[in-house]
Image (cartoon, rainbow, N blue to C red):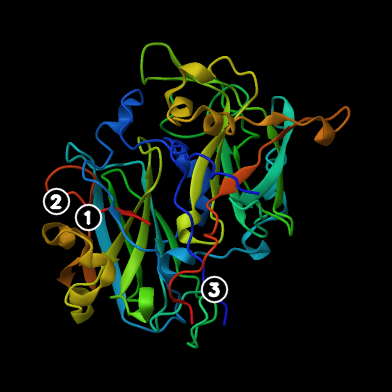
Amino acid sequence: MSKLHAYRRFHPGTQPEYDFPPYASTAKRHPTQPLVIVPQTLSEITGPVFDTDDLKPTDNDLTRQHKGEAIGERIIISGRVLDENGKPLPHTLVEIWQANAAGRYPHKVDRHDAPVDPNFSGAGRALTDAEGRYRFITIRPGEYPWRNHYNAWRPAHVHFSLFGRAFLTRLVTQMYFPGDPLLPYDPMYMSIPDEKARVRLISLFDWENTVPEHALAYRFDIVLRGREATPMDDSPGE
Amino acid sequence: MSLYASGSQTVGPYLHIGLTWLNTTRIAGPAAKGERVTVQGRLVDGDGAGVNDGLIEIWQANAEGKYAHPEDRQKKALENGFRGFGRIPTDAHGNFRFTTIKPGRVPGRGGKLQAPHLSVTVFMRGLLKQLSTRIYFPGDPAIAQDPALKLVPAARRGTLVARRRSKNVLEWNIVLQGKDETVFFDF
């Protein structure tokens, strides 16, 4: 009967604070009382399990979800999902969503004056393989304005949502593109205090995975919380 | 090799595009045993306004207190097709509503049983990382001995216990700030 291992706490500086004034919407939406620290139990170290039955074959190819061709620069985004101990996370769900090439979301609250592409919905999902690898084919998203402050623009980004093996390893993040001049002005990107942790949200240009005469490629590895080296003082799963 | 977990970022206002496909308001299918309940509530911000672009996720055990997960090695039965996961968006007024079964008691640290609860994760624009909380069931005698609730200041414990509106309908609200601010956990 193997003992269960709890998950490590976040390393200081790697996660944003809830109250972050440069991002105006945090003002009325952050808790004002301190979080209550409680030990992890079976309720937190388990979480939903997904499999291939949950997905359709075109779910990871955002350029082929409609009759016509999506407009914009076709790109490949791939990478690995690992835990903090460097172990790959196999068969875990990765969900993405993004704006189209013009920086527009097909969403009723997006009022940006840029064209909607009827052949691009901007949503995809994939399960990682046995080595924790995932791969999406999509369109490079455009930058777009938002109303956080005067002349505010979001850098090009892709939203990522992951589960990992536990409800407490759940992560929603955003992937950015190398060399984007908007990054230092973006409150969301800048909400990660530690510079090294921030930079890890920028994908790498991925020459090896480019497809000649078809698509450039970007690599984005994602790290979820890892296990403690020593087991919990007892084993709630037995 | 030791790495650090990637930084969290907000779901933003367009979360529905990527996340709606997994929405469900019925967490337990017809095969699931146990007491059926509807949970309804409202997600409200610091001005008391409903959050119309929020999303909650629920994770729970079945009526026997067993999770549909390989690391739950308790010798208890699990119904076919029981996953125990729900993703529910808030509506234009910040309201949410789902049906499920009341879970059984699951073990905590030291083998001590916890009171029946639903684990809840909250996402929304303006939230740079998710919030974690729990829903407990009103009138359950196990609440008084629940190890997690005991760590919550007594005056705030009530925010984690749903109120009974009718025989099978519970109300539980998520208050982000101010009086009756919901307790959020750091696991």
> Mark 1 or mark 3, which is nearer to you?
3
Q: Report the chain holding disc 3.
A: B
**Tag 1, which secondary structure?**
loop
The outermost residue toward the right is A212
**The label number, if any, that marks residue B180 in the structure image:** 2
Query: What is the distance, in whole Å, between disc 1 and disc 3 at their CAs?
Result: 31 Å
Do discs 3 and 2 share a chain? yes
Disc 1 marks which residue?
Answer: B173
Q: Is residue A89 left or right of residue B154?
A: right
Examine the rendered structure and indicate whether residue A49 appears above or below residue A186.
below
Q: Quadrant of the C terminus of chain B?
A: bottom left
**Tag 2, which secondary structure?**
loop
**x and y percentages locating residue A232 in the rendered image:** 46, 69
Query: What is the distance, in whole Å, between disc 2 and disc 1 at their CAs?
Result: 10 Å
Return the residue nearer the eye: B174 or A229.
A229
**x and y percentages locating residue A22 in the rendered image:** 35, 23
Q: Is residue B8 left or right of residue B183?
A: right
CB contact under 8 Å: marks 2 and 1: yes
Give the residue type that dot 1 points to: Asn
CB contact under 8 Å: marks 1 and 3: no
Examine the rendered structure and indicate whether residue A173 appears above or below residue A225.
above
Examine the rendered structure and indicate whether residue B31 appears above or below residue B146.
below
Give the residue type that dot 2 points to: Asp
- First in sequence: mark 1 or mark 3? 3
Which residue is drawn at the image coordinates 50% and 71% (left, top)? Answer: B83
**The label number, if any, that marks residue B71 in the structure image:** 3
